Image (cartoon, rainbow, N blue to C red):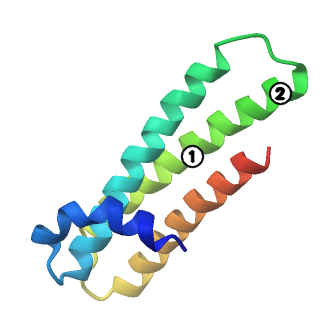
């Protein structure tokens, strides 16, 4: 969806990735996880920064939780990508795609609040 951002985020890994799709996916997941962890810290700090109206406080609490879920999903994805082989490849890939999709959905949910 955002080729310029993707290029900027991953171009520094080009030398190690070369044409290996697994290395590209691993780099993309690692970069995404670092960004989500940074966002999580920022939202947690924001949640403690001032008095919010009840609705605002609820939205921020929900956002903190969904971002934590995204961190977990991306961590599971990074662990799973290291073991994508053998007869269970399709099953493991399906799990990985589900976790990444959930992380993206969590981000959308947080933005909508």
Q: Earlier in the sequence, mark 1 or mark 2?
A: 2
Towards the viewer: 2 or 50: 2
Mark nearest the camera among 1 and 2 is 2
Quadrant of image for the N terminus = bottom right
Quadrant of image for the C terminus = top right
Q: Secondary structure at mark 2?
A: helix
Q: Position of residue 42 (x, y in %)?
A: 53, 29
Q: What residue do we see at 43% from left, 63% from top?
A: 5
Q: Is residue 96 above or below residue 40?
A: below
Confirm or deny contact between disc 1 and disc 2 (CB under 8 A). no
Q: What residue do we see at 51% from left, 63% from top?
A: 99
Q: Quadrant of residue 28?
A: bottom left
Q: Position of residue 22 (x, y in %)?
A: 25, 76
Q: Is residue 51 above or below residue 17?
A: above
Towards the viewer: 40 or 81: 40
Q: Is residue 14 above or below residue 62?
A: below
Q: What is the number of the mark on residue 111?
A: none
Q: What residue do we see at 50% from left, 65% from top?
A: 100
Q: Position of residue 26 (x, y in %)?
A: 28, 66
Query: Residue lying farthest left?
Result: 15
Q: Quadrant of residue 31?
A: bottom left
Q: Quadrant of residue 64?
A: top right
Q: Does residue 54 appear to the left or right of 92 in the view shown? A: right
Q: Does residue 86 appear to the left or right of 106 in the view shown? A: left
Q: Which residue is mark 1?
A: 69
Q: What residue do we see at 20% from left, 61% from top?
A: 12
Q: Secondary structure at mark 1?
A: helix
Q: Which residue is mark 2?
A: 56
């Amino acid at each position: 969806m955002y080729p310029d951002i993707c290029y900027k985020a991953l171009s520094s890994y080009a030398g190690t990735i070369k044409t290996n799709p697994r290395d590209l996916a691993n780099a993309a997941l690692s970069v995404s996880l670092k960004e989500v962890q940074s966002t999580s810290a920022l939202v947690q700090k924001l949640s403690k920064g001032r008095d919010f109206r009840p609705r605002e406080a609820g939205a921020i609490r929900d956002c903190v939780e969904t971002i934590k879920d995204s961190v977990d999903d991306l961590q599971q994805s990074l662990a799973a990508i290291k073991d994508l082989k053998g007869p269970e490849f399709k099953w493991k890939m399906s799990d990985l795609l589900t976790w990444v999709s959930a992380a993206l959905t969590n981000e959308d949910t947080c933005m909508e609040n």
